Amino acid sequence: MPRLSEVIAALENLWPAERAESWDAVGTVVGDPDQEVTRVLFAVDPVRETVDEAVRLGADLLVTHHPLYLRGTTTVAASTFKGRVVHTLIKNDIALHVAHTNADTADPGVSDALAGALGLRVVRPLVPDPTDPAGRRGLGRVCEPDRPLTVRELAALAAERLPATAQGIRVAGDPEAVVRAVAVSGGSGDSLFDQVRAAGVDAFLTADLRHHPASEFTASVAHSPLALLDAAHWATEWPWCELAAAQLDEISDRHGWDLRVHVSRTVTDPWTAHAASTVTAHPSPTTTLPPSASRAPSDSTGAPN
């Protein structure tokens, strides 16, 4: 069985910490370098649900995309949400390792996994990494579908292929516009609007699009068919877990390690229900959620959709 230090070295080779953004907090959060690792669980979020899943699974290592502590803290008391996560991990001899923005820009990385889930062919990075002479690393990806799609068809494809969430897929733009090239970026993507405009694509699929940036973007491309597709943040990054698990599986085979690698299918998107708007003269100030509102599953045994 490999030691944690050996597995971490392999993960750092995939996603070097020095390629993370300066504000990010990546790397090993808890764990004894000398402990043996037999099971590894990949998840998007280091939250109580995924930590409890790691405990039930008997995992020795939890690898997440999102950091546990992105900013400094003065306590890991078990009375706090994050402190309880730390206590549970340590009590159960489970290490935690984070690959965030260093996994976003990797080759392959988070946006490659997102493109792969949608069956899109990656052409190039949306924002190339200037330190990569091969021109493969970078933030986001510019892609092409196998055949031209309408925006409506692309949205339906994303709703079908990405894990199910209460939000689903929101669209800004003409649903019947033709998409021959699309930019994708896992996670929050409205900081990339300038690069999307310059990329010459017909649509941009990402997450966490805010009202004002999206409104200004659509107004600035009023004479262009460029559309926005807004998916749930967690859903756009979950495909990376499957990609990362496959990469570690390959490394394990190459080194002759007896590792069992798993992907969490627990839905940790924070939004749990969605009520479709109804046509009314005026919005009600006391709108309540109807019983028929769709609900995202909290857990599933197959793919999370």
Image (cartoon, grey):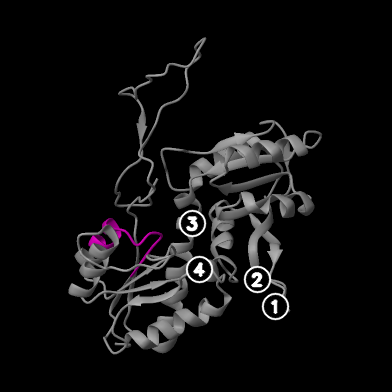
- Seen as rendered, the residue at the extreme front is 74
Q: Earlier in the sequence, mark 3 or mark 4?
A: 4
User: In the image, residue 84 lies at what x, y percent?
Assistant: 23, 63
Q: Earlier in the sequence, mark 2 or mark 3?
A: 2
305 w.r.t. 67: above or below = above
Indicate the secondary structure of the residue bearing disc 4.
Answer: loop
* Residue 131, numbered circle: 1
Residue type at mark 2 is Arg
Residue type at mark 1 is Thr
Position of 133 with respect to 244 (left or right) is right
* CA distance for labels 2 and 1: 9 Å
Q: Quadrant of the N terminus?
A: bottom left
* CA distance for labels 1 and 4: 19 Å
- Seen as rendered, the residue at the extreme left is 91
Query: In the rendered image, which residue does mark 2 sit on?
Result: 137
* CA distance for labels 2 and 3: 17 Å
